[in-house]
Structures are given as structure tokens and as C-alpha cells.
Image (spheres, rainbow, N blue to C red):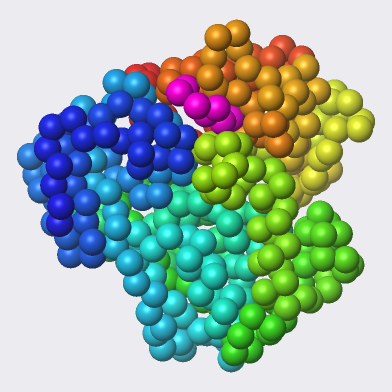
Amino acid sequence: MIEQPGHAALAPLTTLRVGGPAERLVTVSDARELVEACLAVWGAEEPLLVLGGGSNVLVSDDGFAGTVVHVASRGVELIEAGPADAPGTVRLRVQAGEPWDDLVAFTVSNGLSGMEALSGIPGSTGASPVQNIGAYGQEVAAVIVGLELLDAETGELQWLTARELEFGYRTSALKTTRPGVVVSVEFRLHRAGSDALALGLPIEYAQLADALGVKQGDRVALGAVREAVLRLRGSKGMVLDPADPDSVSAGSFFTNPIVSESFARTIPSEAPRWVTETPATLDAPEVYAVKLSAAWLIEHSGLGRGFALPGSRAAISSKHTLALVNTGGATAEQIAELARFVQWRVQSEFGVSLAPEPTFIGFGD
């Protein structure tokens, strides 16, 4: 455990590279240290911020008035399959601080399918279930068995099953009703083979199928899927790359809004949309929930790639309108100001409220 008291810099620990200092920074290297550090802060009744890869937070310029626990625990363990596991599946127990893309690379190289389309997503494994990360037709909820949580209310370690995590679109009970700190996560994957040449799950996402030159529903080698996803994400500035200024971001800054079918009819017909569910209700059997493209709404509200407010170092990515980037020397307030402006433009043009994906730290209510 490494402690840095007194105004420790947080900006270098976030992918946006902004944010003021923490009063105290503690870096933990294993599960035991993680639990001990969090319990000590809670016991002292001090504010606590747990920081993993720093890819989904916007820390204010004032920083954090409390202790930041930086999770650097590592480890991927193959464990015995449970009695309810189907033949051909394996389980992995992964420590919370394991970098997410390192985990995906491990599964692909070992012929384990289920998360290959989630390649290139920055951040830590412990953060992945909090917002139910997803991309190119896959969601982490589909492969999580459960996780070990240090409960913020009781201070005890608890095992939560996937059902108890109440996964939804970019959300989970960890964001709403079950506050705590993820210590480790257990996954169930398919043993497709012994290496990256093994075939992955059927390709469900049209853009990925096009990039691979196959039809939706076809199966492709795990390594090829990973390479295609990394190329797609890289073309949008969504892979961390020191040589790419567009990657100094929090990834997708807004979630795709979900609206009613009737409201979706008010949006121009050329706007991309996807039916997400059909509620089984007797009084409204034809009511649908429709997901809209936040990127399309932003671009067609008049805010194109590279847009920046006058005098600001925060901008919309030059590669993808869904990402807000620090072009160099931006402040957290400049990024927050741009986010509010984007929300206002989309609300004014289409009547749609965009919800930010990153957690705002130190901005007040």
C-alpha cells in the first residue's frame, strides 16, 4: 500500500487528464489492501473516492476533498466450473484493478469467447459491471456470474449474483441501490479453442460484420474480431493512444437515449434507431422502447466534429461526435461547460435529454 498525503495529483490518473488534487491518495496492490483502505476511510467517516482506470470520471478543478483509493490489484484466475455451468464453459475470477483490455486480450489468446467485441475499452475490470459496459453487440452483463462487493453500508464482503446486480443499459444496482467497492469479478466464458484462431460468438453488430467482411450471425476467429474492433475504435479515437490527441477523452460522453415509440416518431426518419424491448402489457401491447443515436443527434443539432466553444481547450472529437476531448490544457470546467452546451443544443433541436456516461466528481449538485 502506497500513501501520498497532501494534494496528490489526480489528473494523471484519468484519461481526460483534468482535475484537481486529492487530499490523500492511497494506491492498493491487492484485495486485502483494497478492503483495509476503504474500511479505514469509512471508519474515520471521511469522503472516499475509489478510482480504477480513470476512464469514466470527470474530476472537478477543485479535486476531491477526501481520500482517493487507487485500485491497482491485478490477477486473473481460472476456477472450477459450477454445477449450473453448461459444458464447454469456464470461469475466471479477476481482481478489480486488472486493466479491462488486458483481460480481453488474455481471453482471446486463450481461446475463450464472450468478450472479444469489448476489446479496447479503457478502464479497470472492477468498473466494468458498474455501468454494464458494452460495444459492438456484446455487454459485460452477458458473461458475469457475480462479484465480490465490499458493502458501503455494512462494511462486510458480500457475493452478489448477476441477477442481484440488476443490469440495464449502461447501469446496474451498483450505481443505484447497492453502494460499495468491487473487489473481484467472476466471469463465465465459452471455451472455443486453445488460441486466438478459435471461433468467437456470432457477430451481431452490423458495423462489425461489415468491417470483417461477413454477414451478421457468422462466426469469426477471436483474434480477427479483436483486431477489427480495435481498428474501429481507433478510427473513432476510442482507443488510448499517446500519439492520438482524440483519445484524451472519457470515451463516449453520452449514452444513447431511450425514448418511447411515439416520441421517436417526432425525430427525423433518417435518424438511426433500434427497438430495445416490447413490454408485455395488456393495456398497451404495441408500446415499444426505442434507442436513438446520441452521436447522430449531436451532429444534427449543428455541432460537428472538432467543435469547441470560443477560448476553450475542450472540444468534440475530430473523429466522433460522441466523445469530448481535452485538446491540451483544458480544465475540467471547460469540459463540463461543453457537455452542458451539447445537452442544451440537442434538447433545443430534438427535445431529447442526453445523459452523461462519466461520473462527475466534485462538481456539487
Q: Can residue 362 be seen in this view?
A: no
Find residue 256 and report its image quarter: top right
| Residue furthest out toward the top | 310
What x and y, as percent, mark residue 274? 80, 45
Which of the two residues, 140 or 151, is positioned nearer the viewer here?
140
125 horizontally vs 48: left or right: right
For residue 181, above or below residue 23: below
* 327 is within the stretch colored magenta: yes
19 horizontally vs 110: left or right: left
Quadrant containing the C terminus in the rendered view? top left
What x and y, as percent, mark residue 222? 68, 75
Q: How many marks?
A: 0
* 165 is within the stretch colored magenta: no
Find residue 165 and report its image quarter: bottom left
Kindly identify the residue that appears in the image at 67 percent across and 51 percent down: 233
Kindly identify the residue that appears in the image at 60 percent across and 23 percent down: 315
Q: What stretch is highlighted in magenta?
A: 324-330
Kindly identify the residue that appears in the image at 61 percent across and 54 percent down: 134
For residue 167, above or below residue 330: below
Which of the two residues, 151 or 126, is positioned nearer the viewer here?
126
Quadrant containing the N terminus in the rendered view? bottom left
Q: Is residue 236 visible?
A: yes
What x and y, as percent, mark residue 279? 72, 48
